[in-house]
Image (tube, coloured by chain):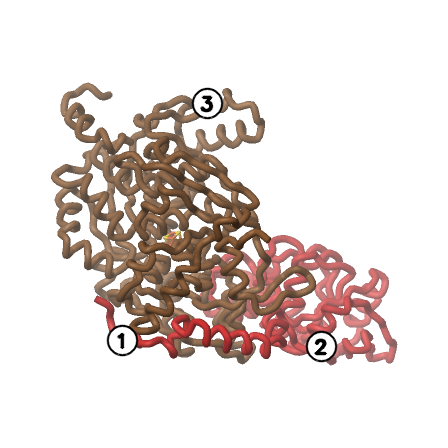
Amino acid sequence: MAGQTLYDKLWSQHLVKERDDGTALIYIDRQLLHEVTSPQAFEGLRLAGRKPWRLDANLATPDHNVPTTLLERAEGNTGIKDPVSLIQVQTLDDNCEAFGIEEFRINDARQGIVHVVGPEQGATLPGMTVVCGDSHTATHGAFAALAHGIGTSEVEHVLATQCLLAQKMKNMQVRVEGTLGAGVTAKDIVLAIIGRIGTAGGTGYAIEFAGSAIRELSMEGRMTVCNMAIEAGARVGLIGVDDTTIDYLWDRPYAPRGEQWDAAVADWRELVSDGDAEFDKVVTLDAAEIEPQVSWGTSPEMVANISGEVPDPDAVDDETVKHSYTRALSYMGLAPKQKITDIRLDKIFIGSCTNSRIEDLREAAKVAKGKKVADSIKLAMVVPGSGLVKRQAEAEGLDKIFLDAGFEWREPGCSMCLAMNADKLGAGEHCASTSNRNFEGRQGYGGRTHLVSPAMAAAAAIAGHFVDVRRLDAETAGAAQPQEA
Amino acid sequence: MQKFDRHQGLVAPLDRANVDTDLIIPKQFLKSIKRTGFGVNLFDELRYLDEGYPGQDVSQRPVNPDFVLNQPRYRDASVLLARRNFGCGSSREHAPWALADYGFRVVIAPSFADIFYNNSFKNGILLITLDEATVDRLFKAVEANEGYRLDVDLEQQRITTPEGEILEFGIDAFRKHCLLNGLDDIGLTLQDDAAIREFEQKHRQARPWLFRDTLHVEPQGEAS
Ligand code: SF4
């Protein structure tokens, strides 16, 4: 018999019961809660007179709706101007208090985007099943945790039963082999993968990312890759355990210690796919060929190399693709065959659960250091993923670098990733964004999102248009001369 | 979910076909954080003369005196009599939430929209499909007789009218079972609670670090 994949192992370790209709009950070790998708779930519990099955499995923090300016945050919840947002955040506080669930509130240093907070606290551990009412829960798969994004009724189901009704997925392996070029990051890897397999390529699969280029990534880079599994259509993204995983978890507040640590590590070491495991589908990419990526359209699969150009719909045979390209170009206000480096930007957003961790901020700061945001940029903002990331960045002086360069330095939250708070794009504005979705209107009505890595976003801020981060110095030196229209 | 076995209640006639979910609960109320509290905005556009918005004090709003639910004789109705294709439109679960919150437990119509049908059963509302002629007859009887009440017996799948007439209705066995026992998805899963507990115990023994109460060191206060 063939060996097991990592996904198979995690599945069978949590299988409570299989039903005749093919659905299964799987046990959930950790549920992360935030203010947008939990209120009706708590309400449902109350109406049915139910209690959470296991309080210590849950951890909550507000993130989607919280304001990110210091002025507003200084007032805590009362600083939230939008009444609906305020009610949602307040309701999360009230529910956590009433049911006894641990919550990092708005001005707790540990508050932040759920997918940054969980791993940072060691609340996401290898071998766990993790759920959250948010589709980017796949992030936690970087720790060899089986992590699912779920809907509100499922949030309630997990609260009440500690189980999720699920169906087993198929196994896909995406191998990225070789060495990444300088200036090419985890974000570029995952955008290139999505560009290759498409936004439906992973539908019905759990994707395991493997290969030497993935092994070389830090945990933060791995989280960036798994985070966007959902953009490739897969609800689950996974990476096997190795020393990098274990080193990251050492001494985290919620991680085991002492003898338990040793036992846990021994267990975690098993969380890799067996050498003879069979995958239903395998895709391989050559890391050396990956360039910095920029999305040009309204779906994450619409990406190009920084050296490339916007496609010409007329050159496409497939009618559906032609149609969607045409529509995307018109929404984005781009011309066929326009060079990516000719796309001018209005706003820059460095943040979101994809790219708001300390290494992301370091990469961006390295690019911005000693430079100035171009005059044509209306707003360039850096939003750390959590209060602790912010604190660390400040200890390293990154905030100074950003502020000196003309970036705004904000308080932690989802911010302009989905524009539920006051941070939004205006109609027609182009934004270089380190987030994960470039759908129409995602960052504000009529807004035009380009997905990039933190370094590429910072470089675009300095140049005012997209530029190969590896050639920024040469380009900006040239831009001093009035040679570019 | 609230159990449903037998229900006797006052009938209100909503004489209108294709009542969609937007009419049942307009979209501006979907921003709410609750699944209760929608009752005051049930049929908002029909019920009030002004435009509704969330968080309004409804007691100050001008009421449409012609709308059936605003007529004193139908106050406290818990059985809604409706026309064809009731509940069409979006998939919002807010529609059954609003009906249930208002106090309706039964809706009788010649046909229902699919998603609405599913959503209603999940929320403890019994939807009964009767043929057009029978529904028509009921409309006439309700309008002619103030205080017209029906006795709905799910176990027997029968409605008894005040005249003593018995109307039989169909329902699939699984839905009937869930309603009779008050079982929603959660209720069904909880029927396996022994299996879950058994699993949990073994899981805890094998991997105690996944349970914070058996975790070696409890995290305290703020992390550094
Ligand atoms: S940062 Fe964006 S994608 Fe991530 S959890 Fe927040 S809203 Fe969702």
Locate residue A320: give its quadrant: top right
Q: CB under 8 Å between callouts 2 and 1?
A: no
Quarter the N terminus of chain B occupies: bottom right
Q: Residue at x 36, y 36 (%)?
A: A287
User: Label 3 crowding class (10 Å Cα cut-off): few <14, some 14-19, many 20+?
Assistant: some
Front: mark 1 or 3: 1
Can you identify the residue that label 3 sits on? A312
The residue under the point 55% across, 47% down is: A278
User: What secondary structure is marked by label 3?
Assistant: loop
- Using the image as rendered, state which of residue B161 and residue A378 is in the foreground: A378
The residue that appears at 34% across and 60% down in the rendered structure is A119
Give neighbour class at mark 1: few <14, some 14-19, many 20+ (Cα, 10 Å).
few
Mark pair 2, 1: CA separation:
47 Å
Residue A170 lies, with reference to residue A268, above or below; the image says: above
**Dot 2, crowdedness within 10 Å: few (<14), some or many (≥20)?**
some
Residue placed under numbered mark 1 in the picture: B220
Q: Position of residue A147 (x, y in %)?
A: 46, 58
Q: Which dot, 2 or 1, sits closer to the camera? A: 1
Task: Please state the horizontal and vertical placement of residue A475, each as a whole percent of the image.
Answer: 20, 26
According to the picture, the residue beneath numbered tag 2 turns out to be B180
Q: Pointer 1 indicates a residue of which chain?
A: B
Q: Nearer the viewer, residue B122 or B81?
A: B122
Mark 3–mark 2 distance (CA, rounded to whole Å): 60 Å
Q: Is residue A312 left or right of residue A23?
A: left
